[in-house]
Image (cartoon, grey):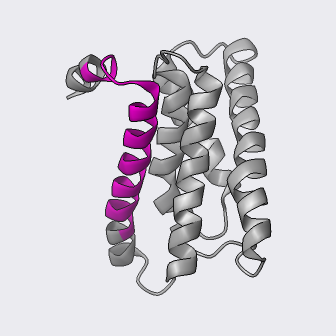
Amino acid sequence: MIAYIKKNQKRLTDIQYILLAVILAFLTQIIFHLFAIIFFKDSIDLSSPFVDQSIGFMMIYGCIIAPALESLFIIFIIWILRKIFRVKKKIYLLIITSIIFTSLHNYSLYYMFCIFPVCTIIIYSYLFYKPKNLSSFKIMFYVHVLINIFALALNYLT
């Protein structure tokens, strides 16, 4: 499976990869959501402290500013892990950074459980995907932005 993904990843354009990552993020979130319903029956809460804000604020903050700042934070964490803690393997960087990034979204245990695979996909986009035209930062940033835009749209549609 990993070999298949690596082989086909090379064929994707940057835009195709970004769209695939966003689709995969939502599919994994649906699966984790279903598992979470089973395990967190009485404490399901997907809200964030910003849900009562205007849609304009949410678009600017949640879909542009937060992804930019969080992407810079992710790169900083990876740098710290590499330089200070001497973590060499990308898979360890992915797991540790995903856990740290998930913990930033600590609105509820349920929310953290559901957001973990999404955080992993965002960080994978920076660490593993080999961009053709865009930088690794831009790939990660655009994946994050699109995930947040679709999440915001779904939040307002429901």
Q: Is residue 77 magenta?
A: no
Q: Quadrant of the N terminus?
A: top left
Q: Is residue 26 magenta?
A: yes
Percent position (x, y) of residue 58? 73, 66
Drawn side of residue 10 relative to residue 152, left or right: left
Q: Majority secondary structure of the magenta segment? A: helix
**Foreground of the two, 3 or 133:** 133
Q: Residue at x 45, y 22 (%)?
A: 129
**Foreground of the two, 26 or 78:** 26
Drawn side of residue 90 relative to residue 65, left or right: left
Percent position (x, y) of residue 38? 32, 76
The answer to whether any part of residue 44 appears in the image is no
Percent position (x, y) of residue 10? 33, 16
Percent position (x, y) of residue 148? 59, 56
Q: Residue at x 48, y 15 (%)?
A: 132
Residue range of the region highlighted in magenta in the rendering = 8-33
Q: Quadrant of residue 75?
A: top right
Instruction: Name the residue furthest bottom.
Output: 42
